[in-house]
Amino acid sequence: MRTSLPRVIRALEQFHATHPWDHNAHYHRWILRRLPRRFDRALDVGSGSGDLARLLASRAGAVHGIDADPTIVDRARELTDPAAPVTFTVGDALREVPPGPYDVITCVATIHHMPFGDALTCFRRHLARGGTLVVVGVYRRQSWSDHLIDAVAVAANVAMAWIKNRGRRAPRPVSMTAPVRPATMTFADIVRDAHQALPGARLRRRLFWRYTLVWHRH
């Protein structure tokens, strides 16, 4: 068993290298289902190649994406129709966000790059009354339930990769080229700090090594 485990891990890594798919983009449609059909202004923090920002633009009067990586911001601009109501800027999301308020703020796989409590406080400050904040984040696995979800996620990940790529080798998506930083907070830490900053926030662990946070400002 001990000798077979490394072989299984290597086999999975090889499979994912030849059949990559974007775990974050998997949640984009889920995010849209948490939002109104129409809203005025939206902010996408850590906008990357702009996939989510462009989806938000189908419902919003204006969408602003901000990301710290100049290269990925240039790519987002190249991929976006100039007529779309979307703008992208390079900057620090905690210091250089264009003035709100925003009816919708989204943040996918980015908040673990920031001081967590400071980020939530910043988002709260920029969110309009009646607005919605949606965060999809990553957490450091610690509890037995974390590892149980991991076990399910590994099998589901292989199945999804096969389905999305139709069994063929696939290029690495543009959205997956950004630098990756491991999460340092456990899910319990995240829940505790989130409830301090955003009373009433709803958090849940998800498949594919993610959690979600949804908060409505009253």
Image (cartoon, rainbow, N blue to C red):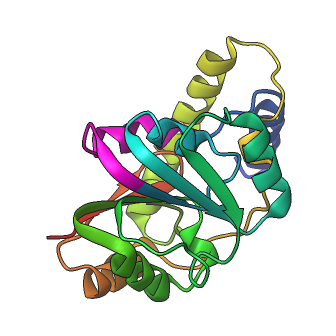
Residue at image position (60%, 17%) is 163
Residue at (82%, 62%) from the top-left corner? 70
Instruction: Give left or right: position of 127 versus 45.
Output: left
Rendered-image quadrant of the C terminus = bottom left
* Residue 67 higher or lower than 72, as above or below: below
Is there any visible trace of residue 8 in the rendered image? no
Q: From the viewer's perspective, is residue 169 above or below residue 29? A: above
Name the spot of residue 216 as percent of width and height, x first. Answer: 22, 64
The residue positioned 37% from the left and 37% from the top of the image is 59
In front of the other: 16 or 2: 16
* Residue 168 percent across, percent down from the top left: 78, 13
Q: Is residue 204 left or right of residue 51?
A: left
Q: Position of residue 115 (x, y in %)?
A: 55, 86
Q: In this view, does 9 lie to the left or right of 209?
A: right
Q: In this view, does 168 lie to the left or right of 44?
A: right
Q: Picture coordinates of residue 102 (x, y %)?
A: 37, 64
Front residue of 138/147: it is 138
Whether residue 31 is in magenta: the answer is: yes
Relative depth, front residue between 11 and 123:
123
Q: In this view, does 154 lie above or below 44?
A: above
Report the magenta residues as a range: 24-41
Q: Give residue 194's quadrant in the image.
A: bottom left
